[in-house]
Image: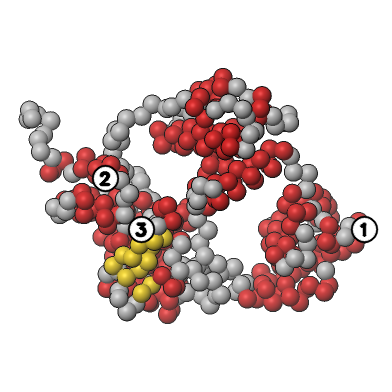
Amino acid sequence: MAPYFGAYSEHLADLGYSYVSHKKKTFIVGDFSGWLGRRGIELERYGPDDEAAFLRDSAKRHSSKKRGERFDLADLSAWLRETGVVEASVCELTDTPERDRVLAEYRAYLAEERGLGPSTIENYGAHIRRFLVSVCGKKDLQLNTMRAADITAYVLRHAPKDQTFAAAKDTVTSLRSFFRFARYRDYVQTDLAASVPSVPGWSLASIPRTMPAECVQPLLDASMTWATPSGLRDHAILLLLARIGLRAREVILLELDNIDWANGCVMVNGKGRQRRPMPMPHDVGEVIATYLRDGRPTSPSRRLFLRSRAPFTGLKNGCDVGMIVRRAALRAGLELKHAGAHQLRHALAVDMLRQGLSLTEIGQVLRHSSPEATRRYAKVDTRHAPFSPSTPP
């Protein structure tokens, strides 16, 4: 790997790694290169099995598993694939079973034919992988032998147990989607999608979990005092969640070009690949500008909010935003039963309802595609209910 050492070293420097992390990540280049040479394995042809064998040998040579070595090797392999040094097909698809091939086709179908977003594709793919593993096990995948009874038995075993209605509904929705794909590709000869059973649920049966109104402002006030780079970022994210009602993934997808400073608005990439400009309050704009000036690391990434530690790339997923909210609540001294990104969105909806805004207006702010989604919030505002439980209608 000697010809590529300099380029990889510069790549790590561009990502903003500290001296210690940089030294640690470049050390594995020589270590892994020597191991491949001793084994007579060509750099261009190594695969996941070779990586696993190297990590096992390394653990034996150093008497213990070196901390973070697996991640350092994964970063190196990813860079080698991206630069074309190593064939991606060799690293990623060595000994790929039939199940993985079908799942790859299914994900491509969801993206190209159905136009679904990456998070939805990942969610559906995870459900179908669990289903195929449960039904087929280690046997060869043969969809044409699958029966409706197999699907029903799986749903009865997995969907209702220890799951909310929404989680169980995700399972059956994914199964229907997959068997429509399987019929489309002639993997099955019957319409198995119609045989997927429904899970019981009632419209508007649940009440949205929301952060108490008396906790939102103390949370925002406490975050104003956080002067570190990560504190400035977290304060800006909390304001976007609480004042504009963005979803966690919408915060992650924000890029520098999405902010229209001249007109005071932000372009939001919402569900269903919808893009909509939203007015940006003055205080939210000030906080974002402060983060850009004093807190955002130097990075080639165009994402608005970046990791606070190297590599300085965008936040990975909605869990990162949820963790920011939970940490912020703890730092503010708030003991909350539910503290997540969506609770701030719900709190905004309830606050607008109590201020007298109509459900139509609330739906426009929250960018709901259906009035039914907004109607859930009417159940929360008991103070403005048309009658109380003790008063007959």
In the rendered image, which residue does mark 2 sit on? Answer: 371
Give me the residue at 55% from left, 27% from top: 192
Q: CA distance from mark 3 to mark 1?
A: 53 Å
Sequence-wise first label, 3 or 2: 3
Sequence-wise first label, 3 or 1: 1
Left or right: 185, with 257 as reference point: right
Sequence-wise first label, 2 or 1: 1
Q: Nearer the viewer, residue 163 or 274?
A: 274
Q: CA distance from mark 2 to mark 1?
A: 64 Å
Whether residue 152 is visible: yes
Left or right: 191, with 281 as reference point: right
Q: Residues within 10 Å of mark 1 (few under 14, many from 20)?
A: few
In the rendered image, which residue does mark 3 sit on? Answer: 246
Please name the amino acid that badge 1 sits on. Gly
Q: CA distance from mark 3 to mark 2?
A: 18 Å
Q: Nearer the viewer, residue 260 or 113?
A: 113
In the rendered image, which residue does mark 1 sit on? Answer: 40
Image quarter hosting the N terminus: bottom right
Left or right: 331, with 380 as reference point: right
Please name the amino acid that badge 2 sits on. Pro
Give me the residue at 41% from left, 74% from top: 291
Up-down: is 284 above or below 165?
below
Please name the amino acid that badge 3 sits on. Leu
